[in-house]
Image (cartoon, grey):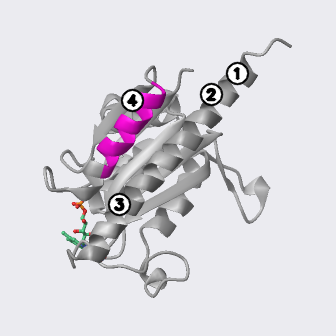
Amino acid sequence: MSSTILLITASARGEGSISRKMAEHFQQAWRSKAPTTTVITRDIGSHPPPFISEAWIGAAFTPAEQRDQHQRKLLASSDEMIDEVDRADLIVIASPMYNYGMPAALKAWFDQVIRVNKTFSFDLGRGDWPLEPIFRGKRLVLLSSKGEFGFQPGGSRHHMNHLDTHIATVAHYLGVNDKHFVSIEYQEFGDERHERSKQSAHQQIDDLVQSLTKLSRDQATYESAPA
Ligand SMILES: Cc1cc2nc3c(=O)[nH]c(=O)nc-3n(C[C@H](O)[C@H](O)[C@H](O)COP(=O)(O)O)c2cc1C
């Protein structure tokens, strides 16, 4: 089985980051089941992508063959990051919750990679829903760490969770049609609830890796089956 994972880490913290530890755990668990997987890593927490600008938007909306050298340069890192998305079957995002949403670095990444005629097409002929993703069949795993708790559906802070919900919405435009969410909560309390949340999340990661690697294996077998 050969597959490609794009692993994005978004915490501004290094050593102490819980979401980075989740990403490491995920990667180790995956490698133990599927050692031939290619993993592309992009650490946007340490190296945030640039914010888009008016010139960037102008370049993105200029047809590729009409772009000047300056415009091509403006879009170069966007091209590179979109290429990483294109190559990935599975996108794993490890992120903290900041101010009830995603870190600015992660939003900057989404702004760079969700681009007209690269990851989505726009056609008013489609009526009220003119945008359609260009990529298809990708999976997303969001591994997140939160200081408070109750952000899951039915929880006391679900209405304040603009991290999982926002990412679930925009991932569609990267061709994602299968999404999985694992969270560690209670970081700010540092009590036994936090410990239980960590243990439960790591178990969920193991179970998820088990089922996703099995799915990839089954898919690979199906794709290589003789007609
Ligand atoms: C700038 C900042 C904003 C935060 N905002 C929230 C928040 O809105 N809700 C929450 O539950 N936790 C919040 N936290 C706590 C983080 O989500 C928590 O510390 C998490 O573990 C950070 O991820 P990391 O350990 O991977 O760095 C915030 C932390 C920081 C540094």
* Closer-to-camera residue (106/125): 106
* Amino acid type at image mark 4: Val
Amino acid type at circle 2 is Arg
Work out which residue is located at the far top of the displayed protein and give it. 226
Q: CA distance from mark 2 to mark 1?
A: 6 Å
Quadrant of the frame with the C terminus: top right
Query: Which of the two discs, 2 and 4, labels the residue nearer the N terminus?
Result: 4
Of labels 3 and 2, earlier in sequence is: 3
Residue 217: which disc? Answer: 2
Majority SS type along the magenta span: helix
- Cα separation, mark 4 vs mark 3, equals 25 Å
Q: Which residues are magenta?
A: 22-34
Q: Quadrant of ligand 1?
A: bottom left
- Tell me: is circle 2 under 8 Å from ligand 1: no
Residue drawn where x is 78% and y is 54% of the image: 125
Q: Position of residue 226 (x, y in %)?
A: 82, 11
Q: Earlier in the sequence, mark 1 or mark 4?
A: 4
